[in-house]
Image (cartoon, helix red, strand yellow):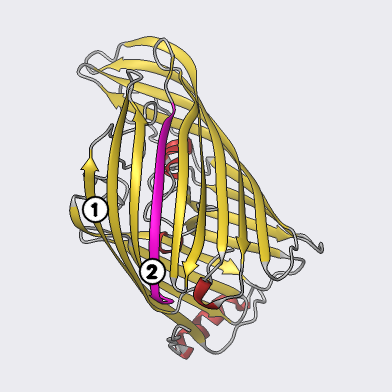
Amino acid sequence: MQKKRSFKLAPLAGAVGLVFAGAQVSTANELDLDISLIIDAVYFNTLSTGNESPAGFSSGHHHHGHSHDHGHGHSHGFDEGFNMGHSEISIEGTLGGALKGVLMLGFNDKEVEVEEAYLQTLGLPNGLQLKAGKFLSGIGYINSQHGHDWDFVDRPLLNEYLFGDHGLQETGIQATWLAPTDTYTLFGLELLQGETSGVANYIGSQGDGRILKDVSGPRLVTGFVKFAPDLGDANAAQFGLSGGYARSYQNTREHSLRNEDWDGTAWFAGVDGVFKHDAGRSYGHGDWRLQGEYFYRAQDVDRRDVAFEGSAVSNVQSFTNKQDGLYIQGVYGIAPRWEAGLRAEALGFTNKVGRGDGKTEDTSYRYSAQLTFRPMEPVFLRAQLSSIDFADDDHSHGNGLEFMLQLNVALGAHGAHRF
């Protein structure tokens, strides 16, 4: 069991209590804070080099062989050799059983970023719960998980390339309702600012000669439902449906003499499922779990090319990009404190890119195997080998092989992991 570190901040809680007094929110006299530090380190080695990016997909940080952050936060890519991985500092506190506050800072050796900072209600009636701030969306299964919760070193390709380097991570409001049924059924609705590169990229007006328009937020609405049937003490499962609509999707590409601007809308939908079995043996021996997700997205945009000089507009056209992706993975406890897993991924079963004359790109694949050792609960050492078969724009495939060795240590208490 992890040691809980609590800090009594009675004067501060009293001050906060005055703020909420008008709203008739009951508060306690003490504010408890739990602080945790997660240190992550990764050794990365490219054993053979294939295509760096899957055909038709522009976002994402692959290939790992060099890191970059796309200008919106710290990078999750890896350099050859030793890397500071995805480390985090988490501070969580509750206020009188009415509110929960979370601050999650992600950092590496170059950058620090606020990954999550939100307030969440704890005492609303009838199964209602509200969350406001910056947070990981509840869509899908893995999107709301942090790196130390994953079963593999890296996030699935579909989450990285359909949404963005950090998945769907936005500022906004989330409302959930736990239905009063015998079977766990949760409905969720999110109203978000709309700045996620894959489904709600926003640039806005950029001065004279550009056609991208200012669109006030919120620009993205998402919804999800999660269903978990009662399978007894040894088994558990959860299934989900998710979707979202962005009323603004913008992009711009700079060429030698002109900018190519896209302006339109986007939407996505997906399904997810996870099944877990508890063998009842020590330290996870014999336990196993399966999980998978599928997502589809469409970007419906108008294109205009705007010359740097004279602001002449040309090459006006409209098109829709249609792309999807899926993964399925399984992990089995091969011995006490040891587990092994396999993951298969496909990106672009549907891969129609409408730009120009339009074209259909090939499907890209990745296959990964991992072996994890947990000497104690908050510590794990993981080795992962990934075979990468990315399609190129000329319909050729380049096969690559990557090896990663990860050390992850969690110090202090942090919130319970999702199912």
Task: Please name the residue shown 48% across and 84% down the image.
Answer: 1
Q: Secondary structure at mark 2?
A: strand
| Magenta part of the chain | 363-380
Residue 7: x and y in percent read 43, 88
Judge left or right: residue 199 versus residue 253.
right
- Residue 302 colored in magenta in the image: no
Judge left or right: residue 188 versus residue 30.
right
Q: Quadrant of residue 146?
A: bottom left
Q: Nearer the viewer, residue 53 or 190?
A: 53
- Residue 369 colored in magenta in the image: yes
- Check disc 2 and report the residue beneath it: 373
Q: Nearer the viewer, residue 11 or 131?
A: 131
Q: Please, what is the three-letter code of the amino acid marked with disc 1?
A: Phe
Locate the C terminus by quadrant: bottom right
Residue 378: x and y in percent read 41, 75
Q: Quadrant of residue 305?
A: top left
Name the outermost residue toward the front: 335
Q: Secondary structure at mark 1?
A: strand
Q: Please, what is the three-letter code of the amino acid marked with disc 2?
A: Phe
Q: In the rendered structure, find residue 44 and report the number of the disc placed on it.
A: 1
